Each structure stands twice: as C-alpha cells, then as structure tokens.
Image (cartoon, rainbow, N blue to C red):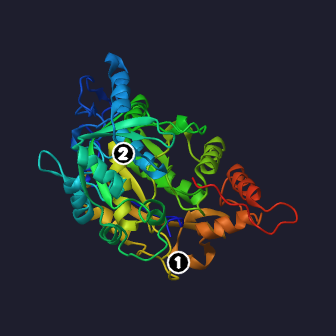
C-alpha cells in the first residue's frame, strides 16, 4: 500500500541545470494582466523561471475585486433563475478549478473533455497538444434539474453552497448523460461495491452532468483554522520564486510523516544538489479533500506535520508545507497522474511517487486493488507528463541494527522491519510505542492523542466515530 516507504522520482537528462530551458537560473514569476469579462485569467511563466503550467499559463477562475467584477458577478448569480447546489466534493472540485490546479480546464467538463479524460487520460489543448487529465472533473444534475434548465433554454446557472448562497456562475452550459458504470469502470478498473469516492460522490449523484465556463465569486475558504496552508498554485509559485528555488520536488501524502518519508525527501534533495541544482525546495503537499473514514483527518495530519518541522526532521528553510485541495479517488495508477499533473501547475518539476500510489485494498477481496509498481510505471509513460522528472527509487524500512529508518539493504534483509500504515495506526490506537527512530516524538504524540480522542467513554464499548478529513 502507499503508506509503506518505497518511492521513486524521475528526470530526463534535460533536467540538469544549464541543459535546457532556463535551468539553473533564479525562479521568477510573471503575472498576467487581469480584467474584463473573461473568466480565465492566469500567471504566465517567464522563460527563465519555474516549469510552465499546462497550456502555458495558470487558468485562475476567481473574479477579481478590482473593476467591480466580483460585485457584478455576485449580482448576476443572484438573478439567475436556475441554481445547482454543491455538495462537499463538488465544492472541493470548484476550489481545484478556481485556482488553476486543473489548468487549462476553464470549468466543469463538457462531454468532449469528459470522454477524453475517461478514455485517454488526457485532453487536447487549443494548440493540439495533449494535456494530462486522468480523472473527470464533473458536476452532476438530477433529472428534474435537467428538465427545468432545458425547458427554459437557460445558458447559465448559479452554483450555490449548502446555505443556498451563490458561489459561482457556470455559463455556456452543456448537459449530457452521466453514465456512472462506464465512469466507474474506466476510472477504477472495477465496479466492485465499496469504493469510497464512488459511494461518496457518484452512486447517489444525478444521472446527468453539466459542464461549462466557470467564474467563481471569491476565493474558497473553509474557516477551519487551516486556510493559511491552502496556497494556490500562483501563491506557491510566488513562494518558490521568493526562495530562489531552481528545482521543486513535490511529495503528496495522505498519512502522517514518519522518518522513512523524511529520509526519502532529504535524500532526494541531496541527489538534486549533486546534479548541480543550487536550491531545490521540497513541496510537502498533503491531500486536503475527501478521504475515506479510516484515514487520519487533515487537521491531525497538519498538526503532525508541524511537529516534523519543529523537531528538525525536515528543514523548514528548504520545505514548503501546503494543502492540496483535491478529493481522493483511491484510483491508483489513474489517479496518480492527476496528482502529478496538478503539481506541475504549482511549479514542481520533480515528483516523488510511492509504492502503490493512490491505492487501497480491494473493497470486497483480501488483496490490494492495484499492482504496487504500476503507479510509478504508468507515471513514467503517461501522455502529457513528459516534462515531469523521475529518479530511480529506493526502498526505506526500519533498520533494527541501527535503530532508525534506513534504505533497505538486501544483503542483510533480516535486519529490516516494514511498518505499514495499518500497523502504524494500530500501534497509535493501542498506545504502543513504535521502534525508536520511526517517527519524531512530537509527531507520534499527536497521533496517540487523536486515537485517544476516539476511545469510548468509561463504561461504553462503542468507539467514537472519526471525522473525515
């Protein structure tokens, strides 16, 4: 599973500083002029700066305050007769689209984009080039909504939150059939019952999809005490430029950071320095959208990550911690492409990929759903990800001879202990200490306190329900 510490990073020869486009120069970000009615605005990268986003610019879809556009859009949304209410996962996708993580998409997918993503794991850009897009980003409608919108000949709808407050306008709309079985089979490679994202966002969703051009009234906020970590691709690029990063390597995770993760991240930086980069910066980028119920909640993970930096396991000077707003599919090799593509848009040209990335156990059988090595193999061949860079992977495990996480040495394999994420959670739930050197003490304390909070009250046998991330 993805929680074991086996990771890979890749890069072609052209990734070396001084060999190719603008490498080895301080990173700079150019900001495009904003204004007018167009929903898509963006940050265009200069030749000597960070890797360019897909399509050459970040497609940012939040209405600007200047010029009165935001106020005008709010009035426009309030006056529209048709409203589509967004659920939790819908709002997370709205957030993703609004900040340009899915550039060059300009809104929820129309049918041509949906079919390309579903069958090719890519969409064709305006210039004819393929852009990786392996998961559909769509919005569902029920039959009553579809009939009402089409009966009026409406060309735009307001998107509203759970309190019926307008948050965006979707214009030049297209409504088409939501073939759920085809979508599930193509995305997950199975239609078995029990897939977490399917049960959360597809099974009970409407039988129609609505796509169109999106304009969001204001930046998406959650007011959960973590918004300061939700840096957009544009903000991350500005931070990397401020730090004069000449390489950015991203590490996606949905679990607490243990010392095996840290070893791999620090070793990646060492290798980049040996290649001639002057200031490679780590983007530690936990997934912040929907996750399954038994995953550690986002708030707990962020507290644990803070301890990792406070205790010096990772260097704060060369690490940026931020939240990736996407929901989690658990769709293995299909989904890992999305995770990688989104980080390109944030400025990362190196991506660390783990064993069985975005994988999970089969929902009805006692086995993993995906081959553990297929994620990194697919990532190295995926259309539209040719600019992403990979290193040969190393396996990390607990070295019982040296009492620390270390790279696996097959010549003394009896000295190594593999501690899975399941085992880690079991230890924390039972207040058992992991081996010394497995995780920083402060980070482990955060986990133990979280599982203690789920323990049943005195005299009760029922475990308290975890709050999803």
Q: Residue at x 64, y 50 (%)?
A: 300
Q: Residues within 10 Å of mark 1 (few under 14, many from 20)?
A: few
**Position of residue 185 in the picture relative to residue 124 (left or right):** right
* Residue 332 numbered tag: none
Quarter holding residue 373: bottom left
Q: Is 209 in front, or is 2? A: 209
Q: Quadrant of residue 67?
A: top left
Q: Secondary structure at mark 2?
A: loop
Residue 390 showing in the rendered view = no
Give above or below for 263 relative to 247.
Answer: below
Residue, far bottom: 365
Circles 1 and 2: CB atoms closer than 8 Å: no
In the rendered image, the vertical position of residue 201 relative to residue 88, given as above or below:
below
x then y, percent, for residue 140: 35, 55
Q: Is residue 114 left or right of residue 257?
A: left
* Residue in the picture at 36% in, 26% down: 75
| Element marked by disc 1 | helix
Identify which residue is drawn at 62% across, 73% down.
417
In this orientation, which residue lies closer to the viewer: 397 or 136? 136
In the foreground, 52 or 100? 100
Q: Quadrant of residue 11?
A: bottom left
Give x and y (percent) for residue 34: 27, 24
| Residue 411 image label | 1
Q: Distance of mark 1 from mark 2, alpha carbons?
A: 35 Å
- For disc 2, the marked residue is 348
Give the residue drawn at x 56%, y 77%: 413
Are there few (<14), some (14-19), or many (20+) residues within 10 Å of tag 2?
A: many
Determine whether, in the image, residue 148 is placed left or right of residue 84. left
Q: Position of residue 117 (x, y in %)?
A: 26, 59
Which label sits in the foreground, 1 or 2? Answer: 2
The answer to whether residue 219 is seen in the rendering is yes
**Residue sticking out furthest to the left:** 128
């Amino acid at each position: 599973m993805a929680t074991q510490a086996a990771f890979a990073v890749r890069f072609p020869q052209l990734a070396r500083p001084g060999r190719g486009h603008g490498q080895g120069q301080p990173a700079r970000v150019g900001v495009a002029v904003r204004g007018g009615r167009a929903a898509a605005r963006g940050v265009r990268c200069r030749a000597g700066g960070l890797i360019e986003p897909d399509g050459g610019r970040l497609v940012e879809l939040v209405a600007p305050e200047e010029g009165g556009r935001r106020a005008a859009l709010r009035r426009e949304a309030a006056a529209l007769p048709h409203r589509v209410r967004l659920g939790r996962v819908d709002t997370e996708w709205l957030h993703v689209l609004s900040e340009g993580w899915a550039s060059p998409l300009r809104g929820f997918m129309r049918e041509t984009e949906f079919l390309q993503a579903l069958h090719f794991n890519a969409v064709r850009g305006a210039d004819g080039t393929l852009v990786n897009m392996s998961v559909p980003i769509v919005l569902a409608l029920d039959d009553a909504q579809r009939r009402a919108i089409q009966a009026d000949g409406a060309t735009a709808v307001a998107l509203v939150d759970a309190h019926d407050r307008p948050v965006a306008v979707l214009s030049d709309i297209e409504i088409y059939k939501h073939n759920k079985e085809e979508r599930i089979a193509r995305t997950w490679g199975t239609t078995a019952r029990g897939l977490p994202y399917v049960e959360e966002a597809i099974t009970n969703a409407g039988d129609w999809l609505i796509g169109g051009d999106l304009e969001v009234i204001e930046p998406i906020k959650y007011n959960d005490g973590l918004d300061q970590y939700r840096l957009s691709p544009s903000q991350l690029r500005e931070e990397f430029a401020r730090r004069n990063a000449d390489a950015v390597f991203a590490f996606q995770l949905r679990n607490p950071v243990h010392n095996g993760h840290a070893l791999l991240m620090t070793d990646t930086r060492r290798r980049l320095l040996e290649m001639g980069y002057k200031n490679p910066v780590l983007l530690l980028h936990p997934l912040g959208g929907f996750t399954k119920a038994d995953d550690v909640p986002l708030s707990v993970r962020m507290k644990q990550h803070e301890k990792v930096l406070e205790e010096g396991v990772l260097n704060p000077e060369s690490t940026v911690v931020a939240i990736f707003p996407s929901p989690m599919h658990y769709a293995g090799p299909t989904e890992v492409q999305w995770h990688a593509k989104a980080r390109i848009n944030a400025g990362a040209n190196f991506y660390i990929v783990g064993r069985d990335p975005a994988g999970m156990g089969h929902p009805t059988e006692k086995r993993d759903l995906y081959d553990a090595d297929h994620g990194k193999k697919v990532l190295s061949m995926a259309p539209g990800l040719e600019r992403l860079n990979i290193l040969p992977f190393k396996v990390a495990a607990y070295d019982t001879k040296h009492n620390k996480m270390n790279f696996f040495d097959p010549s003394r394999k009896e000295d190594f202990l593999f501690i899975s994420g399941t085992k880690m959670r079991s230890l924390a739930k039972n207040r058992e200490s992991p081996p010394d050197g497995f995780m920083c003490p402060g980070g482990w304390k955060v986990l133990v306190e979280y599982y203690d909070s789920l323990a049943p009250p005195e005299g009760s046998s029922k475990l308290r329900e975890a709050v999803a991330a």
